[in-house]
Amino acid sequence: MAAQIDVLSGGRFVMGMGAGWNEAEHRAYGIPFPPLKERFDRLEESIQVAKSLWTSADARFDGRYYTLAGANCLPRPAAGRPPLLIGGGGEKRTLKLVARYADEWNSVNVDVETYRHKRDVLERHCEAEGRDPATIRRSMMVFAVVGPDEASLDAAARRLMSMRGMAPDTDPRAFREALRARGIAGTTDQVVDQLGRLAELGVEEIMFQHFNFDSDLVPEYLAAEIAPRVKGL
């Protein structure tokens, strides 16, 4: 399916893979949620299976969890496609898998100093794998609380607090300050400053999670106010 989407989209598809984390979501859909080690073992085998199917007319793989016996995936994507994105920040296995297999590393919602540390860990894994870390694109998915005014910031904060099961009487502004200490939150100038510091560390793309599905205010704000100020970073 990934190969077909890549072909149909004219090479605009990015294949994102990870070990999984949301146990409740897995249970809701009846999908097994094995222990962490097994999930990572399955992830690595899945990456090897996918790459074999994308490149070979006679794909073979004999793993602990998955097997291919002369499989032929048609249509196959163009050489080197689709790019593989691996998400997460685990230093022992995730970043090692990024160094070994990924075209893009997608970090998840960390502050600037934490990102700097994890970038350094990734570069050490790249050295061990004999890979130039500059060949790995860098992106970040963030649970950001942003908006054009205090009211929209409070609304976004309350929405995220509700999703996290926090008490409804929690002060949204205190929550925003705590979030800003470990991610992206705040006014336009604060957000631009945070994005600038991440750009200096090599982050090329930020993926903002949107929480209020009944309003386009925040996406419109990001497009009109934030994007023009950071497009040259």
Image (cartoon, helix red, strand yellow):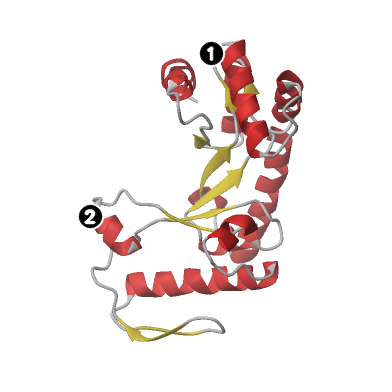
Q: Quadrant of residue 194?
A: top right
Residue at horizontal 31%, vertical 63%? 3
Residue at horizontal 71%, vertical 29%? 179
Can residue 98 be seen here?
yes
Q: Quadrant of residue 111?
A: top right
Q: Quadrant of residue 132?
A: bottom right
Classify 10 Å Cα crowding around label 1: few (below 14), some (14-19), many (20 and above).
some
Residue at horizontal 71%, vertical 56%? 91
Q: x%, y% of residue 207?
A: 50, 37
Residue at horizontal 55%, vertical 40%? 141
Q: Which mark is residue 194?
A: none
Q: Nearer the viewer, residue 128 or 54?
A: 54
Residue under circle 2? 8
Which quarter of the figure is the N terminus placed in?
Answer: bottom left
98 up-or-down from 12: above or below: below
Classify 10 Å Cα crowding around label 2: few (below 14), some (14-19), many (20 and above).
few
Residue type at mark 2: give it.
Leu
Indicate left or right for 224 with 89 as reference.
left
Q: Nearer the viewer, residue 197 or 60?
A: 60
Element type where label 1 sits in the image: loop
Q: Nearer the viewer, residue 117 or 210?
A: 210
Residue type at mark 1: give it.
Pro
Whichever of labels 2 and 1 marks the residue nearer the N terminus, that label is: 2
Q: x%, y% of residue 178?
A: 76, 28
Can residue 21 be seen here?
no
Residue under circle 1? 148
Q: x%, y% of residue 28?
A: 56, 59
The CA span between labels 2 and 1 is 38 Å
56 up-or-down from 169: above or below: below
101 up-or-down from 143: above or below: below
